[in-house]
Amino acid sequence: MRSFIVDIVSLGVVVRCCVSAAEVDYTQYVNVFQGTISGGNRFPGVVAAPFAMVKLGPDVQSGKKDAYSGYLPDGSIWGFSMMHESGTGGAPKYGVVSQMPALGNVTNPLADLSRGRATADEGQIGYYKSSLSGGIKVELTATEHAGLYQYSFPAGNLSAVVVDVSHVLPSFRGLGWEQHYSKGSFDLFPDGHYEGSGTYNNGWNIAPDWTIHFCGRFEQKPAISKTFRGNGTTPKSYDSTPSVSGPERLGGVFTFRNSSVTSRVGISFTSTTKACQNIKNEIPSGTSFQSLVVKAKSRWNAEVLSKIQVSSTNKTELELLYSSLLGMFLIPSNRTGENPGWNSTEPYYDDVFTLWDTHRCHTSLFQIVQPVSYEEFIRSLIDIWRHDGFMPDARSSNFNGRVQGGSNADNVLADAYVKGVSGAINWEDGFSAMQTDAEKVPPPNNDPRAPDSSTKEGRGALPDCLKYGYITPAFTRAVSRAVEYSTNDFGLHQVAKGLGKAAEAEKYLIRSRNWRNHWNPNATSEGHSGFVVPRWANGSFVPQDPLSCDNSWIYSMNAIHDVALLKQWIGGDERFVDRIDKLFELNIFNAGNEPGFTSPFLYNFVPGMQHRSVERSRNISTRYNGGAGGLPGNSDAGAMESNILWQMIGLWPMTDQTTFLILSPWFPHMTIYLGSDNKLEITTSGGNKDTAFYVQSLKVNGKQWDKAWVAWQDVFANGGTMEFVLGPSPANWATGPPPPSPASGDL
Ligand SMILES: *[C@@H]1O[C@H](CO)[C@@H](O)[C@H](O)[C@H]1NC(C)=O
Ligand SMILES: *[C@@H]1O[C@H](CO)[C@@H](O)[C@H](O)[C@H]1NC(C)=O
Ligand SMILES: *[C@@H]1O[C@H](CO)[C@@H](O)[C@H](O)[C@H]1NC(C)=O
Ligand SMILES: *[C@@H]1O[C@H](CO)[C@@H](O)[C@H](O)[C@H]1NC(C)=O
Ligand SMILES: *[C@@H]1O[C@H](CO)[C@@H](O)[C@H](O)[C@H]1NC(C)=O
Ligand SMILES: *[C@@H]1O[C@H](CO)[C@@H](O)[C@H](O)[C@H]1NC(C)=O
Ligand SMILES: *[C@@H]1O[C@H](CO)[C@@H](O)[C@H](O)[C@H]1NC(C)=O
Ligand SMILES: *[C@@H]1O[C@H](CO)[C@@H](O)[C@H](O)[C@H]1NC(C)=O
Ligand SMILES: *[C@@H]1O[C@H](CO)[C@@H](O)[C@H](O)[C@H]1NC(C)=O
Ligand SMILES: *[C@@H]1O[C@H](CO)[C@@H](O)[C@H](O)[C@H]1NC(C)=O
């Protein structure tokens, strides 16, 4: 394994985390292009540290394709911009604060200046390169709040950089979620630098106007600096006017007599002064490009990649492991100190896309790998409630939205609470924030695509829940919302119980069973009876074929706090196993869709059936690799990546509970560093990942283990060991008590 040395002297800045020369450079295994095609929508550009605010990369146009992260593998590049999302659907967000190189005298900055690529883009952690037609090369690196552009132009011509403030990623889907440029300002300064701001709105979260400030400097003095403005096909003004502002397209053009141009750009949500300060603090004049690349690699190594170490030397597996780890920590964005909405001493994280996706298995691994930012993230969710009234299910551009099902911040908080996350979190406020979700109907946001109730935050269908204990078809997505609200209420139960609020704990435990009110024992499908279906106000079930809507099959398995009861209602162990089998046989299970994530592993609730979960785990794993098409669906802000990481670890988290279902680890030896010198060591012997993966026996912390699950306290709270013996055929090793079903009571 290659090692590298951090050149501390050349950095000119303090290295946050100290990677000694002897340590391994895990970034060598990272493919930043993992999950960038086939709908994965991962962002391959520069993210200098986990959750960095600046995500610097190319914006590509290719017919009417939406470029969610800015990047598409084919098509021409029309700008390199500072802000992006990673692995999202809905509609593109951001793609703002851009620069675009051009050759010669730029006669019309409003014209299409996009350029095809001469070769495919290249990238590593901390580094991105595009080779454009006309012999222009663009190399990018960045810090948390600033970016460094290094342009190489062909000799013998003028070199130009165009800054178009109206640049923002478009959407062609026609769903009303496209972003708009609203207005901007652009100022030229005598020393050749520029400052300004752009205001934009809409996107998937239907956000109002929001503003980003920028400050740009060139290492070479421009020969000519101009501003432009105009909405038509040619500029209304294009000259040395020092300031332009307003609702028209506007910006600046900088022309150089040098084939090499370097630009440093800072951004800030609060002011241009802060944007300039961000450059000064993070990329002072003379900073070497390479030093920032090295620093980004060392931060990712120290803060994320080195947290999970394995014995494998198989490049394919290492690429999948470390590329997936990268993909988990690109968003949200740590915008502490950059919140234009309110002054607070609490941390601030934005770009939450979305807790609906991430609460099942992403946030639990986020806690393990990045405990410090996880605590900050939870505090930020609570602070958003303090100032905006509700925690987000999704949020970007400082605005909550949009909600897909329940109020899943409740699950995120509960999952953290039961695992002892505390630090500076005010849990009384945390519980109040959860109670707001559970009790307060969010004001309507008049979403034309879901007019029945708010899609901004909270639980829109709460009125029905409170009145009937179920949700009628008066609300869209009645069944999926009802089941999610039940899991959310279970989250409230967990936190109330821990805080000693006995009455609330009891109340929300009862409410967590509301999913049962949607259970129609007479609904039949493919030899099975009993499914969650919509229900009218008069109490009758809507006669609906559960297969006509995959939702019924999937959501019938989703009250994971109440599995013992579910199993009984499905008809006992054998029927329960067959029900899970059918999800696969009928092709209902979709490895790329989060509501189905836990179902393949519920076999662990049936004595002697743990090996079936392992088979499913291996099957799901075949859908992943470290390549561009290596995710089975949208990355969904890293939810997809966290799923494969749990398969590799050989455990599956049961959100809101301390339970982890046991699968089968991939590697002879894995160490997970948990902080405070704690670690979990997972070993396998006697078998292998591909052909002899059945668990034969297990020791946990040196003791023989007969349960198909472990609890947080067993192996994560203070670390521990799990020693698996694997073999080529199933063994009936898990003869102990089944995993807990905390809402089912004594059945
Ligand atoms: C400079 O670039 C412009 C625009 O691409 C082009 O029209 C012109 O021919 C180039 N001049 C030279 C000397 O390469
Ligand atoms: C660019 O424009 C300037 C001023 O209009 C002119 O002097 C110069 O010759 C032009 N250069 C090229 C390469 O077209
Ligand atoms: C420029 O066009 C935008 C829409 O693209 C519009 O909102 C704005 O009002 C226009 N500005 C002027 C000054 O015409
Ligand atoms: C071009 O830029 C390089 C790098 O900053 C600098 O060393 C050189 O002096 C510049 N050349 C001209 C002609 O300005
Ligand atoms: C490396 O891992 C891949 C993916 O798990 C597997 O298909 C392949 O057989 C392994 N190669 C070797 C040499 O073990
Ligand atoms: C935050 O505090 C600063 C300094 O007192 C003030 O200028 C600013 O307006 C405040 N921002 C908000 C959103 O209250
Ligand atoms: C989040 O950002 C703030 C401000 O830049 C910083 O102080 C804090 O350490 C960051 N959090 C983490 C976990 O890096
Ligand atoms: C289910 O069907 C049986 C037999 O037709 C009927 O007695 C029972 O009331 C039905 N249950 C529900 C909940 O509709
Ligand atoms: C309940 O209401 C639905 C929808 O209004 C109606 O179709 C159904 O017949 C009603 N059932 C009973 C038993 O009244
Ligand atoms: C995965 O499951 C599907 C559906 O049951 C099956 O067709 C396929 O053969 C399985 N693949 C592997 C590698 O187990």
Image (cartoon, rainbow, N blue to C red):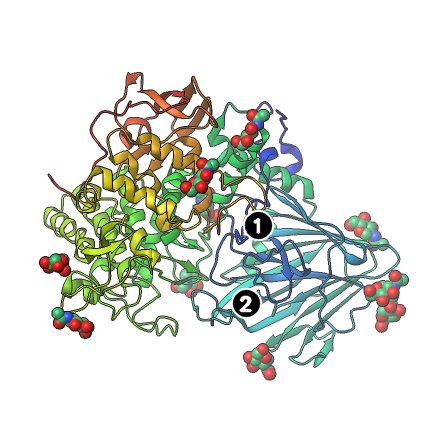
Give the number of the disc on residue 171.
Answer: 2
Q: Quadrant of residue 607?
A: top left
* One can see residue 680 in this view: no
Q: Pick the quarter of the image with the C terminus.
A: top left
For badge 1, the amino acid type reads Thr
Residue pointed to by mark 1: 36
In this rendering, the answer to whether 483 lies above or below 198 is above
Q: Dot 1 lies on which element?
A: loop
Nearer to the camera, 381 or 329:
329
In this rendering, the answer to whether 250 lies above or below 418 is below
**Residue lying at 50% horizontally and 52% vertically, measured from the top left:** 87
Locate residue 64, reporting x and y percent: 60, 67
Nearer to the camera, 635 or 697:
697
Nearer to the camera, 591 or 407:
591
Q: Earlier in the sequence, mark 1 or mark 2?
A: 1
**Residue lying at 31% horizontally and 16% vertically, measured from the top left:** 702
Nearer to the camera, 401 or 584:
584
